[in-house]
Image (cartoon, helix red, strand yellow):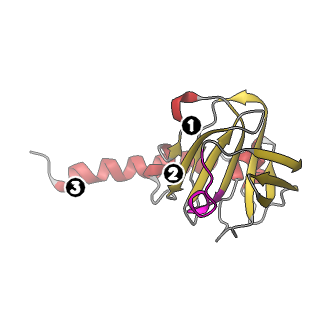
Amino acid sequence: MATRAQVLVPIAAAAVIIGIIGVLTIPADSKLAEVKFPRGTIKLDNKMLDVQIAETDAQRVRGLMFQDSLPDDQGMIFVFSQEQVVPIWMLNMQFPLDIIWFDANGNVLNIAKNVPPCKSALETATCTVQNADGKKAMYVLEVTGGFTDKFHITENSKMQIISI
């Protein structure tokens, strides 16, 4: 029978290696302490939101990493050039998110509620949220956890882009 050390040491080593690989694969410009995102405005049902726009690969990788909070009237919108399956990872997040996937017409495809941040290096490789049923999205909106319940956002909700 294996001892506790014989089991834990390889697991710890794998976690460290995965964490290092994860950090090394992040584009350099997304590692900066503060990243400036373009800003825009969207309307989700009757709720206006000031959004940070993530439209480049580096911006999408960086996302809301290291931000301490997100007010109810703000969010981050990930914009893609074509509809695609978009997994979201929660690396270096500081608070839970509601994540909403939209098609090109602003229709809600899926909502993931109160998604917790990753807690360990081992989760770096596995800490992703998948869009249900692999539906292809053009936009993904991240808002603070609890937003969709507070403002009654459902799969029947509609997003309107005001400016992005």
Location of mark 2 (residue): 19
Label drawn at residue 131: 1
Residue at the left extreme? 1
Of the two numbered discs 1 and 3 on the same chain, state the one appearing first in sequence.
Answer: 3
Describe the element under mark 2 as helix, strand or loop. Answer: helix
Which residues make up the magenta segment? 143-154
Circle 1 crowding by C-alpha within 10 Å: few under 14, some 14–19, many from 20: many
| Looking at the image, residue 56 lies above or below residue 30 | above
Q: In this view of the protein, which residue sits in the foreground, 155 or 54?
A: 155
- Left or right: residue 151 versus residue 55 is left
Q: Is residue 152 magenta?
A: yes
Q: Quadrant of the N terminus?
A: top left
State the residue at coordinates (54%, 61%). Answer: 96
State the residue at coordinates (72%, 44%). Answer: 158
Of the two numbered discs 2 and 1 on the same chain, state the one appearing first in sequence.
Answer: 2
Residue 110: x %, y % from top left: 58, 40
Q: How many marks?
A: 3
Q: In this view of the protein, which residue sits in the foreground, 96 or 118?
A: 96
Describe the element under mark 1 as helix, strand or loop. Answer: loop
Q: Is residue 81 magenta?
A: no
Looking at the image, is mark 1 or mark 3 nearer the viewer?
1
Location of mark 3 (residue): 5
